[in-house]
Amino acid sequence: MKIHVTIYLLAGLVLSQLTVLAQTDTIKPGEVWPDAQGNHIQAHGGGIIKVKNDYFWYGEQRRQGLDTNYRYVSCYTSKDLVNWKFKNDVKIAKPDTVLDKWVIERPKVYYNSKTKKYVMYMHVDGQVKSTTPNQKPTSGYGYARVGVAISNKPTGPFKVLKTFRPLGHESRDIGQFIDDDGTAYLIFEDRPYGFRIAKLSDDYLSVEKEMCLIPYHMEGGAIVHYNGLYYAIGSALTGWSANPNKYATATSLAGPWTDFKDIAPPETKTYGAQSTMMIKVVGSKKTTVIFMGDIWKPKTQWDSRYLWMPVEIGDGKLWLPKPGPWKLDVKTGEATVIKN
Ligand code: GAL
């Protein structure tokens, strides 16, 4: 009996030590970011929501060996935004028979506290097949729609309800913004016109009202509301290649927006990253805004990395410092960049 208890105690001690080893408090931009099982996090073009005490990170699952009949949206959870546990790959079947070479990109999930549903928006695209002999198939991004899927649980399964063009407009890269009052918005790139911000319906299942069109061609749209000002950021349209991301500000989502300015020295091309979201961490001592970007590796997508850094923000200015390892305390909201 005594021996058994001792063995259990020892095993418990070893396990707790291993857990301690697996935990980290440091975010290392550009490096492999292991999840709790040691696998590189696959949540590209992602978005993050907080529901009660848990953060959920959804993104493009791009690991090798996936069933190519489907596309997958990954879901990870965390309490501290640094240590992430893989929960599920949400399986998405082809949502429309007219599609060839289809993609699901930049998935974003909203939690609707009234309906208690998790609502996923995603960029659905691909080549639209020709239906008559005279008609040519479109380009690989000719569908230009959003897809909406719904689930009772954060980890799925999600049921795809529909695909559509929000308020009748083309929609490619999408971004998610939830304001301090809880109102949910979708940011979408409308190629002929620019960057649109629109409010979702009460049940989040449709895009209800356009707040504004920023007539500037931008992808990877992201917004944060900080100290009474809205800051919108985005990248130029250069596909997987990095470019200088820029920001503008406005006192209301409806604008007017200022001109766009660089968020980092333009020659660094945003240190090789493309914006996907800005997260605001409101802690007991500080409010920190984190730039979340993707460092794409087009030929080895599964090895694409992340650039997350706390930004310098305030009084209409936003600046992404040179990336380096940093620590985050979600409770106090303090971010500490580790000096070499
Ligand atoms: C980027 C876009 C990505 C993906 C890529 C394809 O500009 O932000 O989400 O669509 O183009 O080339």
Image (cartoon, grey):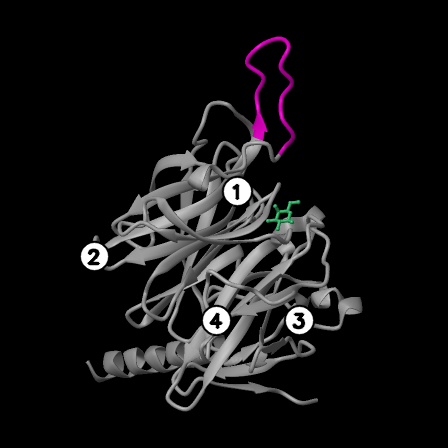
Question: Which tag, 2 or 3, sits closer to the chain's start?
Answer: 2
- Left or right side of 55 for 2: left
Question: In the structure shown, which secondary structural element does the residue marked by tag 3 occupy?
Answer: loop
Residue marked by disc 3:
263
Instruction: Determine which of the numbered discs, if any, sits on residue 43 in the image.
Output: none
**In the rendered image, the vertical position of residue 74 relative to residue 244, given as above or below:** above
Question: In the structure shown, which secondary structural element does the residue marked by tag 2 occupy?
Answer: loop
Q: CA distance from mark 2 to mark 3?
A: 37 Å
Query: Which percent across, then down, holds residue 80?
Result: 42, 76
Residue marked by disc 2:
114
Q: Amino acid at mark 3?
A: Ile
Residue marked by disc 1:
171
**In the rendered image, the vertical position of residue 91 relative to residue 142, given as above or below:** below
Question: Which tag, 1 or 4, sits closer to the chain's start?
Answer: 1
Question: Which tag, 3 or 1, sits closer to the chain's start?
Answer: 1
Q: CA distance from mark 2 to mark 1?
A: 27 Å
Circle 1: is it few (<14), some (14-19), or many (20+) Cα within 10 Å? many
Q: Amino acid at mark 4?
A: Thr
Along the viewing direction, whichever of 170 and 8 lies nearer the viewer: 170
Q: Are marks 1 and 4 in contact (CB under 8 Å)?
A: no
- Left or right side of 252 for 265: right
Query: Which percent across, then down, holds residue 20?
Result: 44, 80
Q: Are marks 3 and 1 in contact (CB under 8 Å)?
A: no
When asked about the image quadrant of residue 129, the answer is top right
Circle 4: is it few (<14), some (14-19), or many (20+) Cα within 10 Å? some
Identify the magenta region: 127-140
Residue 39 visible from this viewpoint:
no
